[in-house]
Image: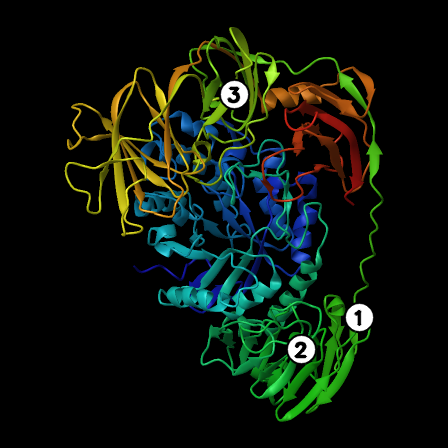
Amino acid sequence: MSHPTTLDQGIALDARGIRFEGGPQLVLCASLFYFRLPREQWRARLAQVRASGYTCVDVYLPWNFHETAPGRWSFEGRRDVAAFLDLAQEEGLYVIARPGPYICSEWDGGALPAWLGLDPQLRVRQHEPRFLDRVTAWFDQALPLLAERQYPANGPVIMVQLENELDFFDCEDRTGYLTALRDQAVRHGITVPLIACSGQGDLEGATGDVPGVVPACNFYPDDDSPHIEPEVRRYAELLAERDLPLLITETNRRHRTLRRLLASGASLIAPYLQSSGWNFGYTPSAGNWGRPGNLMSHGYDFGGYVSSTGTERPEYAEAQILARVIDTLGPRLALATPTGPHTPVTTDFPTSSSPSALRLDGGGRLLAVPHLGTRTGTGTGTGAGTGTGTGTGTAVVNGVPVAVAADSCPLMLVDVPLRPWGHDGTLTLASADLVAAGEGALVFSSEVPVTVVVGDTRVVIPAPAAGAPRRATAAGLTLVALAPADAVRLRSTDRNGTVRLDAPAPARHAPAPVAVRRARRRADTAPERAAGRHELPPTLESLGVYRGRGTYRTTTDLTGVDELLLVGAADIVDLSVAGRARPTIADFGATRRIDVREATGSVDVEAVVEIWGHANFDDARLPALRLGALRGLGTLWTVRETADVSALWSVHGHWAGRPAPLRELGGWSSTRVGLPVTYTREIRSATAAALHLKGVVEPVRVTVTDGEPHTVDTVHEPLTVHTVHAEDPWVPLPAGTHRISVTLPHHPSGGGLRAELLGLEPVTDWMCSAQDDDQLTGFATEAAPGQEVLLPLALAPGEEAWLDIDLPASHGGLLLRPDGTQIRVTGWAGGECVGRVWAGDRPDFSGGDANVLWIPPGWSGLTLLVRGAAGPEVPELRTLWLESSD
């Protein structure tokens, strides 16, 4: 399939790279998200990215951040993306805009609005008219803003990404879907390159091979892997066959790895989340990588070069040095192509299994030599990719021994003509980063000795120290070695090697945390909106709650009932039965058994269900982690009877003949390990039922068919097909007679399966009330009287306290760290919900520090909603620690 490469609006893409601004460009791009920062900090954060040497930012546009309810659009205040793009241009940055419709980004629902799931016919991320109609409404809002700000006419936007990592998702018609998105972009006048990124290397799966949609790649390797280069080079070669450059739209943040990508042929390198931010309010997602149900924290930080509070980390200086190398080599590097055979390299430290090199335009090569060891001790490795070296190691390049610092990846130059820098001759070898070059002088950055060969003259410059440059001469050139701390401050260099440095940034000393022990407790609680009486618990979205929480109440007879079965509950459920609070449930739709033997007769049941976030990734292991899944209590059942149905299963498969043998579930013996065996039996239930398969390790297939007539060998059409796994080993069954077929690989050393049938009756007649995020925010930000209380504050499980807190002024904002047990804390300031913290027994979290709330500077007032959660300890808010984030 051919792809357009040269575009008449001033941007050209071909196998040699990206061309705009009148020449070739190697682009370093940092993620920076307006929706995760206060508007007052946009300009400073953009300027910080530009000062790092990066020339571009990539920006998601979250659909559900702008369409806050069906047909209700907002592009004001912190949602004014147009203003953000204009600021990016003013700060000298280009923009890669990523309007989705799906963005992932560990954001609520991946930015797909929650109410899409209310239409059972609508299928997200598919070539399906209902979904595309809603996408059209979104693109009609977003794409004109981007079209008006495209490069080169009116703005900084140099590329627009359609969708996001579609190759992770089971899209049935990728070509049709991406064609529909492309056509909408073209209709709105988008003329810059349209790109689509592959999350796991499936270029066709990400783009549908649609003409006019350029494939890009996301790489998230192990930074210490010796095998990064050959994987990346393969994609550079595949794209070069289409006369396209390698665009890396997401990758790790570590510059040692980014250098390896550059040397492997990347023209765009965009480490994801170099500049961190915050998940304000109810915007974090649920169901991230790792254990099912993993929650995203208020802090959105994966260790990039700028922290969530704006602090520059050591990688920030690494960025500045890499940017200096790119600027110094200029078009020679931007037009470079991967080369082979590689310059001979041997090392005494662990390094790449297949180092990458580039043929520079105009002659010479750039060679990346990663040292994958640690920074202590001395080199003890035994060769490329096999050593265990630490400290400073030695590489032999073209027969010349050179020093390489641990945990580094110098970009060495080999056989580079010096004429472009005003000197006749050849730079035969330079073992360190070239950060400046001019007539008569070359400046290198290194923390170890630098070996430079000019023509046939070799010099070794001793390792420089901060504030103490080292100099040498060779073939009429002045050679200067700077410590990295000085290289980032380099302003200019004279012909004689005199360097001028900018003044170092003043050191910052954070004051010690301060304990806050006084608060005003409000007498009132937030009002609830009545949401009617319902036979079965409705979803929160059907009650108009897309972010927020709801309460479900009923009375039910538990005479003779020992347990309840909760099916489909999500996200965070505080359940109380007969006045007794149960441990908080965060199973995300997994079926949960609840012991109620201590309750009898007619009892009250109450459930408060909070939406932490909708799934941002399509995880089939739990119902509520499917993309587009709705939130709410699910269905609560009383368990009326329980029966063991592990025996009397007929066996089909391997050499089992007819009549089919009868065995216990999983009990067939065979020498054919790993081949599928099917176990079938009839199950009758007078009521709705649930089949529980205990002992499931690997996923098994369960087929439910009509059980009439009752003969073993009769073939029936399946009513339902389930994949049962360890996270949710349940199969729902309607009342009646059914044939159940369980197919699993033969595993003679496995633990075996047991099967249990639970007869069920639904708990009905629910009264519902709702509190969406607007209602809660309105209550929290209204002035209200309160009674002063001193911490610690003890709460009963399910009890809530609204606390108003006085905060000192702060230039850079404040970090609030609640110290307590079994409490969930939600904070509001400046008219917005700041975020949430969960102290005590809780699900897994990912992202930044899950234990703090950040109050941005200028966000006046602080109100906390503190809720006690049942668990192993008594709920208690002991104190609140305040830390300056200046």
Amino acid type indicated by mark 2: Ala
Secondary structure state at the residue bearing disc 3 = strand
Image height of 339 relative to 551, above or below: below
Amino acid type indicated by mark 3: Asp
Image height of 161 relative to 634, above or below: below
- Residue placed under numbered mark 2 in the picture: 437
Q: Is residue 861 visible?
A: no
Task: For the C terminus, give its image quadrant.
Answer: top right
Residue 516 or 414: which is nearer the viewer? Answer: 516
How busy is the neighbourhood of tag 3: few (under 14 within 10 Å), some, or many (20 plus)? few
> Going 70% across and 59% down the picture, which residue do you hit?
314
Image height of 452 relative to 322, above or below: below
The percent coordinates of residue 244 (x first, y second) are 40, 64
The percent coordinates of residue 168 (x first, y second) are 41, 47
- Residue placed under numbered mark 3 in the picture: 595
How busy is the neighbourhood of tag 2: few (under 14 within 10 Å), some, or many (20 plus)? many
Quadrant of the image occupied by residue 436: bottom right
- Residue placed under numbered mark 1 in the picture: 466
